[in-house]
Image (cartoon, rainbow, N blue to C red):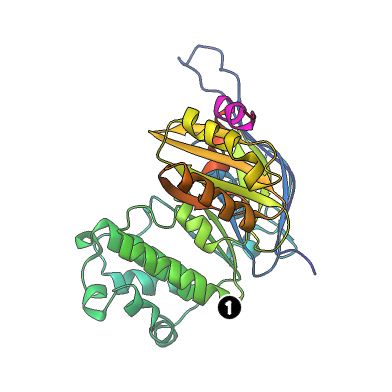
Amino acid sequence: MEPAISVRDLTKRFPGERPQPWSPPRSESIALDRVSFDVAPGEVLSLIGPNGAGKTTLLKILTTLLRPTAGSVRVLGHDVVADEAWVRARVALVTNSERSFYYRLTGWENLRFFCGLYNLGRAELAERIHPMADDLGLTPAVLARSYRAYSTGTQRKLQFLRAFVLDTPLLFLDEPTSSLDPVSSEEIRRIVQTECRRRRQTVVLSANNLVDVERLADRVAFIHHGRLEMIGRAADGPGPGPVRVTLRAAPERVDAALRAGRSTVGALGEWALEARAGLTVVRLVAENPEATATALLDLFGRQHLAIDQIDLRPFVLEEEFLRRVDPILGEAEEGGL
């Protein structure tokens, strides 16, 4: 099956600025450095990384808003440069800073205008927005109000409604829940989970809110300094895996308890400890994570150590993010005691 998105050796450079008109330009900056990946039809891929890592630049290239410096990008088999108009008609983009809506028009008039560019008539638009508009709280009374009277959250919801009703094969989301309260964020996630899955719509989302990533993504890719690396996906199943236990105790007490109880826990192997805001996190890899976790809970209970949390997930996005961004933290976490 042909990928919905195919990226090969994608590079994007921006020319250096001139401090003064007569000054020589500064060295150019590299936003994306030989990025390659595929996205399967119907897949939800999430991009994570620190601010300035290149996530938004990548989305803009995929949606034809920027041209690559080198490499190739194909969307549904078409080159985003050579077939720009064809690709643009088949993608929808929700940005984290919307400036395209007309402030003097109502929400409904804005929808009619932009959807008309996609040859979507009034009757068809009215049919498509239900029940999504109601799910987002965009009732007919709200859509009849001027856009400039909308709160930031309502403006964001109108962006999503515009993108969803177009029903394009590909949907790109840049910080989908920024500026939204928890209830509105959950409404957006629910529509992506249900409506986009039902349509088998291919979704690429860039997010700093890792809750969005954990709830929505099939796969996760990490971008840092313009380089992209696939992290993979959390998958449940038997076999060796990590065990993380967070305790309300000093690392010295936790380490002493582990050494004293090594024989009762079984093949405990090596462990790593991390002190974090008054807590201690124990990390280890076990042949049978569930059995090891149970033994550790019993051990720490007998040592009167207060347990705050236990986690058996194959990877934790927040830890992966910190480990890849902060090499000092990564080195500290990799060392065993």
User: In the rendered view, would you say 100 is above or below 246?
Assistant: below
Q: Is residue 187 left or right of residue 57?
A: left
Residue, far top: 23
Task: Report the label total.
Answer: 1
Residue linked to disc 1 = 199
Residue 266 position within the rendered picture, expressed as x and y whole percent measured from the top left: 68, 47
**Residue type at tag 1:** Arg
The quarter of the displayed image where residue 77 is located: bottom right
Q: Is residue 149 left or right of residue 329?
A: left
Q: Is residue 217 left or right of residue 99?
A: right
From the image, which quarter does the N terminus lie in?
Answer: bottom right
From the image, which quarter does the C terminus lie in?
Answer: top right
User: In the rendered view, would you say 236 is above or below 276?
Assistant: below
Relative depth, front residue between 230 and 96: 230
Relative depth, front residue between 201 and 308: 308
Q: Residue at x 56, y 17 (%)?
A: 26
Residue 194 position within the rendered picture, expressed as x and y whole percent measured from the top left: 50, 76
The quarter of the displayed image where residue 177 is located: bottom left
Q: Residue at x 69, y 64 (%)?
A: 237
User: In the rendered view, would you say 320 is above or below 100?
Assistant: above
On the question of residue 279 being in view, the answer is yes
In the image, which residues are magenta? 327-335
Residue 87 position within the rendered picture, expressed as x and y whole percent measured from the top left: 64, 62
